[in-house]
Image (cartoon, rainbow, N blue to C red):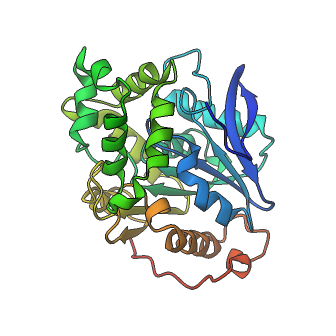
Amino acid sequence: MTAPGGHRHVTVEGRRVRHRVDGDGPPVLLLHGIGRTLRDFTQLHDLLAERFRVHSVDLPGYGGSLPMARPCTLPALADFAAHYLDAVGVDRPAHVVGNSLGGAVAMRLAASEPARVASLTLVNSAGFGREVTMALRLLGVRPLGRLLLRPSRWAARRAELALFHDPALATAERVTYALEVARQPYAARVFLETARSLGTFRGVSPQWRAELLAEVERLDLPTLVVWGDRDLILPAAHLEAARTRLPRARTRLFTDCGHMPQIECAEEFHRMLVDFWAESGRDTDGVDPRDAAPGARPTVAEAG
């Protein structure tokens, strides 16, 4: 698979993992969603690298990272994230940003190893409700799931269009890359393992959600939860559930935005993030990150 410039590989638990590392300063870890890759954070990565040491990583079995030897479950992915931080020498708490599945991985990492996490930013995150797009629910139906994951340009374009409120973002280049990722020999298996460990045809399973949110709520950890109001994958109503379950978290709803605010509202998302980290007072080396963010302006986040 084609690897754009700047991507490297590192060995994590004996497996080759693709990642990208840039910048200097407090560490940041960016975690993508199910079936996705680190490219979902390209623009945010570039913006943050002006002030932070930014790590984007393909989760195991996705993009350019080989699968784990064990099944791809949420606890296994959180363990992987911890081992990745060890492999790249991050020895201090990191700001962890997770989109969709990546948000659930971030929460599981924080709950299991809170000393590794300086703050949590959960972006249209799995874990706050049962409702999820029918396309993911159908993966729980055997053998329909594997048939639905057969790579095709039509399926790749449909999936890209579902991610964004603005259809212009579902570019031919994004569709081509999504199709390339889907054609990896292990892609369908890992996707199904992940999806079926988290839910069924009825939706996202309640047991792991309840247990995880209870653990995260007990943490003394700055947390920001954001959503796009036009999300077709995980509905924006889940933001209200986040406000209920994590009452100390800050929240933000982006208007006219889909499942990936970090792409669709990139500059505003970046400003919001560095403001949140500056105001949280966690791990900024005594320097306000906004001082190094070109064009930064205050962003008002709604109180949770």
Residue 276: % across, % down: 56, 71
Residue 101: % across, % down: 44, 41
Q: Is residue 183 visible?
A: yes
> Toward the viewer: 219 or 18?
18
Q: Which residue appears at 61% of the width and 71% of the height?
A: 274
Q: Is residue 257 left or right of residue 104?
A: left
Q: Is residue 12 above or below residue 20?
A: above
Q: Is residue 5 above or below residue 224?
A: above
Q: Is residue 267 above or below residue 120?
A: below
Q: Quadrant of the N terminus?
A: top right
Q: Is residue 224 visible?
A: no
Q: Quadrant of the C terminus?
A: bottom left
Residue 58: % across, % down: 60, 37
| Residue 287 placement: quadrant | bottom right
> Toward the viewer: 48 or 91?
48
Q: Which residue appears at 54% of the width and 26% of the height?
A: 61
Q: Which residue appears at 31% of the width and 36% of the height?
A: 154
